[in-house]
Image (spheres, rainbow, N blue to C red):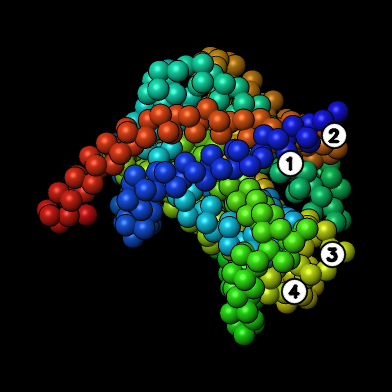
Amino acid sequence: MLEILNKISGFVWGAPLLILLVGTGIFLTARLAFIQLRLLPYSLKLVFTKNQDKTSDGDISHFQALMTAMAATVGVGNIVGVATAVVMGGPGAIFWMWVAGFFGMATKYGEAILAVKYRVKDDKGQMAGGPMYYLEHGLKQKWLGVLFAVFGALAAFGIGNGTQSKAIADIMASTFSVPHWISGVVLLVLAGMVILGGIKTIGRVTSFFVPIMAVFYIVAGLIVMIMNINLVPQAFAIIFEFAFTGEAAVGGAIGAAIRFGVARGLFSNEAGLGSAPIAAAAAKTDMPGRQALVSMTQVLFDTLIICSITGVTIVMSGQWKDTSIEAGALTAEAFGHFLGGAGPIVVAIGLIFFATSTIFGWGYYGEKCFQYLFPNRTAILVYRIVFVGFILVGATASLEAIWALADILNGLMAIPNLIGLLGLSGVIILETKRFQAKLAEERRNGRS
């Protein structure tokens, strides 16, 4: 059974889907005239300004919406996923991860702009949005929205729950000798307190939690680079060289570097999968374009910064050449090469933080997908309770078949979402022009 599921997963995440994901990013980048470069300074200003929008419709601020999305995407993939890309595709995979991230910023922008434009208020007066809503109300294809919601509600138990809780329990056991069941119980209680509180609680917690965990890991990586600054240029040279020669890839094929770099980059930042727009739809914003600019910075932070810290450190260490080191341990070995016994602890703490935050974010994503299918308060509460309870199952059991199935569902989420993005690309352009006109007026009046 597991072998069959793995083959299906390999097919779903094969070249056609990866080409479609990256191709959509390239298409939107061209139509939006490289908006990820043109308006990046303003995007960062929106993220970090103290004067967040407090009066427009929405449940949480720009920053809280971004942190909720980052909580879901910054996870095991930033540590183990990058290492897997290097092991399977060589150092050159990191370059292709950057390429996927760059174009993924445009995809993330498009997803968010549609999520805000087509969001609705539920019976509690809270915002509900995401691919299921713009597929129904924008593209007029409700059946695609239903498909996305089914895939998302189920996939949340794997990518956003079981795999994360298992990773935390494993690292706590191997690094700190904590039994799996204890880690599971503690995580269940903590996650339950956050997830059962709904989006406002999730937003408050992630806006405090995510910046701390990201800064911790980034600073640790920068310390390694500064202490070994002479190795940094060489590491970048190796990454660029192997990106086009592919000599370090399995089988010596340049295709391996591209395939695994793109796949792991997209798996990490989720650009095109349709998950992050669900958080973007909850933001307080006067125009879809403003929150869309904030949302696209998620890929910058996730892939172009945090994943790069992991990848460059691995290449600097030279540990990627040791074929006896498994991908799951490669990042810890790389940090340990420079920091001694403190290295694995730094990676362990980073992984615990990242995986815990992913559970918070995906708890909300799964709930909103389920709410679209069953808009009943009791049903939503039941989903939250089951999701939180599954944390203990994931931490203590070996459920490879479930993880493989969730990986398939996660990939299937992208198909209806990408259909929506391409079909509604004209709406994305129109909303962008409207926003840019308003932004130009604000700048003339000195309000931006």
Which disc number belongs to residue 71?
Answer: none
Q: Percent x, y for residue 314?
A: 70, 68
Q: How packed is label 1: few (under 14 Cα within 10 Å), some, or many (20 or more)?
A: many
User: CA gap, disc 2 to disc 3?
Assistant: 24 Å
Amino acid under label 2?
Answer: Glu
In this view of the protein, which residue sits in the foreground, 21 or 287?
21
Residue type beneath disc 3: Thr
At 72% from the left and 66% from the top, the residue drawn is 247
CB under 8 Å between callouts 1 and 3? no
Marks 4 and 1, how far apart at CA: 28 Å
Q: Which residue is mark 3?
A: 323
**Upstream in the sequence, badge 4 or badge 1?**
1
- Residue 232: quadrant of the picture: bottom right
Sequence-wise first label, 4 or 3: 4
| Left or right of 352 in this view: 109 | left
Sequence-wise first label, 2 or 1: 2
CA separation, marks 2 and 1? 18 Å
